[in-house]
């Protein structure tokens, strides 16, 4: 296996007494689409800017392509960045913007022209070269920013929330375009985002960050299916939690006492973050079913429907489980012939033991 | 509603009369064929302008003033660029108090500055010269330049600078290729404001002028002689036209800057 | 060593480095001269020889001699009247431009307000002498209209003339900060006040005025402090009873050749205006934060 393009180890960043990043250890593989995901203020942008060279790290090491970046200033690093505001130079035309980095490298004029034309064409802006940059739309500005960075053929492209300024429809279109572009150029992309859907649909791997620390690094499927703690599970999609108490471990089996569901025996690997300190059982809303008529499930429990949110293709139910009054959410697809329950009705909730996760 | 509107309109009307009264009278007396500056008016003449043309001391004073104003404009804009850039881009210890101190001459009576510079020059045994006036003028113009330039620098997206560095450019080239063109309208405005303030400044020049007078010091000397007054009116008219022309030029640059970059980044004139 | 290197690469060092030329200039030409004036005010001068023994005699003279007391009080009074008149003139104008003029025209109006101030300061003040004088514009037109037989003599060479002329000179400097403050007032707050049932006047008094107070305070400071040091206006239109403290300061430095006393007078005047300004700012803070606002 090739060596990782970016290696971070023991990285800390302080602003005065405030610790923005704490003990970041992370390897980003060559050619992957990697996302840093987290709520605002979690340190993801600081981490991206540290990789770019705009933040001086307080401790730890940062290697790009095997070389230490400690004394390498931002303008000599093999990374380029697409800024959240795009930072298009307002006093230059589109092609002058794209040529900016090539001119800094003092390349021959003919080569600059050729590469600028290629880059502009690559992002679908043919014919826009002589346009003044301040008249462009949000989507066009973003394409200019991409072309300006990619024309330099960086080892890593850093993207700081590049889609947050666009409206929903354009954002979805750009998501798939970005993904295709990344596959086409084969450059490592590191994307910062607070939008979990964006991260899930675009990335090969995702690092979830909270409060300056990395909570989990995994592929989108693994992150959704096997979050290692309650905070991650709640940030990526939705999850129901029921209080649980570990009664004992026997080989690869765990005996737990779960609120409303009673005593269960689970596989040890269902404790995705390790058995230590586990105190809840989590289950995704779509892993639960409301049983219709003669339908049966592995396990069943009766519950009272307390609220119904009808979305057309889906219905979200909030139900109260017996004995402990725990409230959980169930999402059901409105397939042909399925009856939508009303508030106050009793529902038979079907579940399976294998869809539960044991978390802390 | 109607009453309030009518009151405001009346008020504005009277206010404009009050505001423009002196500026309006200036050309009236400049072209009045009488050696006494008072009503009733006599007739039309341009002779007061020809008197100006043949007054040698006036030319010397005007040349002194222009030289002082040009040097003042360049240096106070230079100091202004440094300070505005430092305070809008960097956080450094004591920033607020340092800036407060540099901006102090804006609220200090000019006589205090004039007196204190006079004391230093005399105590240190220097000669009063045009350079002492230049020093005083740079001191009072710098805060105005900083005020104009700060808004120009603050409207600058910091990401633009980082983008340039990120694309491989050096710090100096980033300043030359990205920052400077974008704050240029602010720099032009700053030069013009400092030039205009210096050209019209009297108190400091009055305290620090040695044997060579500036234009306002010369005018002050002439105000005592009634027969000189009509030609001073002509001089005032010329100065008014020159100032307005300078302002219009500054405004042209500001608009061009906005058109070119699509962002408002120059700051006003005052 | 490493920490020093990191600090030198950091923001703080770069900022200080950039600002240092301007700061050094200001220290050399502002701080040191001001300190020397303070030092001088505690010394004495006999013709050309300077006695550097510490004494408060100059301050005793400045604060006890009736003539200086009187001049100081008069200067303070004139400055206060000028400030009040300036704000009174400036507020409606700023309000008009901010609330009544369409947004596209605002810049033009501000320009219109500032044009008259690009005439020579000295000539502008002298023209007030022409307007207010015995054979001046006002007397000329009033006699011409047959409204008066004798020219009015109470309008020139007195304190009223000084107040009027200074207010004219400073009014744009008061309009601008008030205008900026009014522009920042969120229009929806005023609509909210209307929606909650306030009348026009109460809405103005309870919402617009308090929110524009920072601009009024800035305008007050900008006008009040420099006017007390004005030299030209009292000399040209003030007459013997309209002279102010700076005329005396100039006299001490030049003709009377008593720079130490002049310094003491200058510093006393500065101390008084600063003190009055601070009281004013403090009162306003109380007003803005107080429950009545």
Image: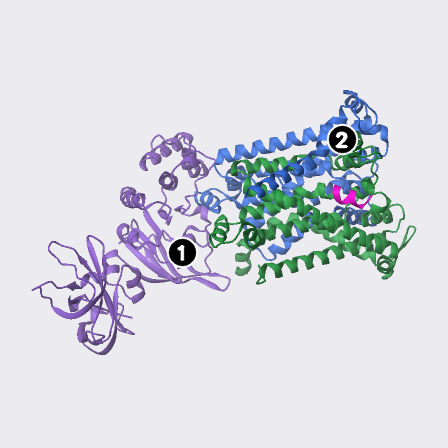
Q: Name the residue under label 2.
A: B62
Classify mark 2: helix, strand or loop: helix
Chain that is coloured green in the picture: C
Q: Nearer the viewer, residue C258 or A63?
A: C258
Residue range highlighted in magenta: C158-165
Residue C161 shown in magenta = yes
Q: In this view, does C195 lie above or below B172?
A: below
Q: How crowded is mark 2: few (under 14 residues within 10 Å), some or many (20 or more)?
A: some
Classify mark 1: helix, strand or loop: helix
Q: Can residue C28 be seen in this view?
A: no
Chain that is coloured purple in the picture: A
Residue at 83% from the left image edge and 46% from the top image edge = C243
Q: Name the residue under label 1.
A: A47
Q: Give the chain letter at badge 2.
A: B
The x, y position of residue B110, in whole percent, is 75, 46
Q: Position of B90 compared to A188: left or right?
A: right
Q: Which SS type dominates the magenta stretch?
A: helix
Q: Position of C74 compared to B98: left or right?
A: right
Q: What numbered label is drawn on residue A359?
A: none
Q: Distance between the residues labelled 1 and 2?
A: 60 Å
Residue B107 shown in magenta = no
Specify the quadrant of the image occupied by residue A324: bottom left
């Amino acid at each position: 296996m090739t060596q990782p393009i970016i290696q971070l180890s023991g990285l800390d960043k302080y602003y005065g007494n405030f610790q923005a990043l704490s003990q970041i250890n992370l390897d980003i593989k060559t050619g992957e689409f990697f996302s840093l995901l987290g709520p605002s203020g979690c340190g993801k942008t600081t981490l991206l800017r540290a990789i770019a060279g705009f933040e001086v790290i307080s401790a730890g090491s940062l290697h790009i392509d095997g070389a230490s970046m400690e004394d390498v200033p931002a303008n000599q690093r093999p990374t380029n960045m697409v800024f959240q505001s795009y930072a298009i130079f307002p006093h230059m035309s589109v092609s002058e913007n794209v040529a900016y980095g090539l001119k800094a490298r003092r390349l021959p004029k003919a080569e600059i022209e050729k590469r600028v034309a290629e880059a502009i064409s690559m992002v679908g802006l043919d014919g826009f070269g002589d346009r003044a940059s301040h008249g462009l739309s949000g989507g066009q500005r973003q394409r200019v920013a991409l072309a300006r960075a990619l024309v330099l053929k960086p080892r890593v492209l850093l993207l700081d929330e590049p889609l947050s300024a666009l409206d929903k429809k354009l954002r979805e279109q750009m998501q798939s375009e970005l993904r295709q572009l990344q596959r086409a150029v084969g450059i490592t992309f590191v994307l910062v985002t607070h939008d979990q859907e964006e991260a899930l649909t675009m990335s090969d791997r995702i690092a979830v960050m909270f409060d300056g620390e990395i909570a989990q690094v995994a592929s989108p499927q693994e992150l959704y299916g096997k979050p290692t703690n309650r905070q991650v599970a709640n940030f990526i999609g939705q999850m129901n939690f029921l209080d649980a108490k570990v009664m004992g471990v026997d080989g690869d089996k765990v005996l737990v006492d779960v609120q409303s569901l009673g005593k269960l025996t689970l596989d040890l690997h269902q404790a995705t973050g390790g058995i230590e300190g586990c105190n809840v059982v989590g289950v995704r809303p779509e892993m639960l079913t409301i049983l219709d008529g003669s339908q049966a499930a592995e396990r069943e429990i009766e519950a009272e429907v307390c609220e119904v949110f009808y979305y057309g293709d889906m219905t979200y139910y909030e139900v109260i489980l017996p004995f402990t009054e725990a409230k959980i959410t169930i999402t059901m697809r409105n397939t042909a012939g399925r009856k939508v329950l009303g508030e106050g009705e009793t529902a038979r909730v079907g579940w399976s033991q294998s869809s539960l996760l044991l978390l802390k | 509603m109607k009453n309030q509107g009518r009151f405001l309109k009346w008020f504005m009307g009277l206010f404009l009369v009050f505001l423009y009264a002196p500026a309006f009278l200036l050309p009236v007396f400049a072209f009045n064929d009488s050696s006494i500056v008072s009503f009733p008016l006599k007739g039309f003449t341009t002779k007061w302008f020809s008197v100006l043309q043949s007054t040698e001391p006036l030319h010397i004073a005007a040349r002194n003033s222009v030289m002082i104003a040009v040097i003042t404009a360049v240096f106070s804009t230079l100091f202004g660029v440094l300070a505005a850039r430092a305070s809008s881009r960097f956080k450094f210890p004591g920033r607020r108090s340092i800036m407060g101190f540099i901006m102090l001459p804006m609220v200090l009576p000019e006589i205090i500055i004039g007196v204190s510079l006079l004391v230093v020059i005399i105590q240190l045994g220097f000669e009063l010269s045009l350079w002492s006036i230049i020093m005083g003028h740079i001191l009072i113009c710098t805060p105005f330049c900083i005020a104009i330039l700060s808004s120009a620098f603050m409207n600058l997206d910091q990401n633009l600078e980082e983008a340039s560095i990120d694309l491989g450019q050096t710090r100096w080239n980033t300043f030359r290729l990205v920052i400077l063109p974008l704050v240029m309208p602010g720099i032009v405005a700053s030069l013009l404001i400092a030039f205009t303030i210096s050209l019209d400044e009297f108190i400091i020049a009055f305290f620090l002028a040695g044997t060579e007078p500036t234009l306002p010091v010369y005018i002050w000397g002439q105000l005592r002689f009634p027969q000189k007054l009509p030609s001073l009116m002509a001089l005032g008219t010329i100065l008014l036209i020159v100032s307005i022309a300078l302002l219009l030029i500054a405004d042209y640059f500001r608009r061009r800057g906005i058109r070119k970059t699509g962002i408002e980044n120059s700051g006003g004139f005052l | 060593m490493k920490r020093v290197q990191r600090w030198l690469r950091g923001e703080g060092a770069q900022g200080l480095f950039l600002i240092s030329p301007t700061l050094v200039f200001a220290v050399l030409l502002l701080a040191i001269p001001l300190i020397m004036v303070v030092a001088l005010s505690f010394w004495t001068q006999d013709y050309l020889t300077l006695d550097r023994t510490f004494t408060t005699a100059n301050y005793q003279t400045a604060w006890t001699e009736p003539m200086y007391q009187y001049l100081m009080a008069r200067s303070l009074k004139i400055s206060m009247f000028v400030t009040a008149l300036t704000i009174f003139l400036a507020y409606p104008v700023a309000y008009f431009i901010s609330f009544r003029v369409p947004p596209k025209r605002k810049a033009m109006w501000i320009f219109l307000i500032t044009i008259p101030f690009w005439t020579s300061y000295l000539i502008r003040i002298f023209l007030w002498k022409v307007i207010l004088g015995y054979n001046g514009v006002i007397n000329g037109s009033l006699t011409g209209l047959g409204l008066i037989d004798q020219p009015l003599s109470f309008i020139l060479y007195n304190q009223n003339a000084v107040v009027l002329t200074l207010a004219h000179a400073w009014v744009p400097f008061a309009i601008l900060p008030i205008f900026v403050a009014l522009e920042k007032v969120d229009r929806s707050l005023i609509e909210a006040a209307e929606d909650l049932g306030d009348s026009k006047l109460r809405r103005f008094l309870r919402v617009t005025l308090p929110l524009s107070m920072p601009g009024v305070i800035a305008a007050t400071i900008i006008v009040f402090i420099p006017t007390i040091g004005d030299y030209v206006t009292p000399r040209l239109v003030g007459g013997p009873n309209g002279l102010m403290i700076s005329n005396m300061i100039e006299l001490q430095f030049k003709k009377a050749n008593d720079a130490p006393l002049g310094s003491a007078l200058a510093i006393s005047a500065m101390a008084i205006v600063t003190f009055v300004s601070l009281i004013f700012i403090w009162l306003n803070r109380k007003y803005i934060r107080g429950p009545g606002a």
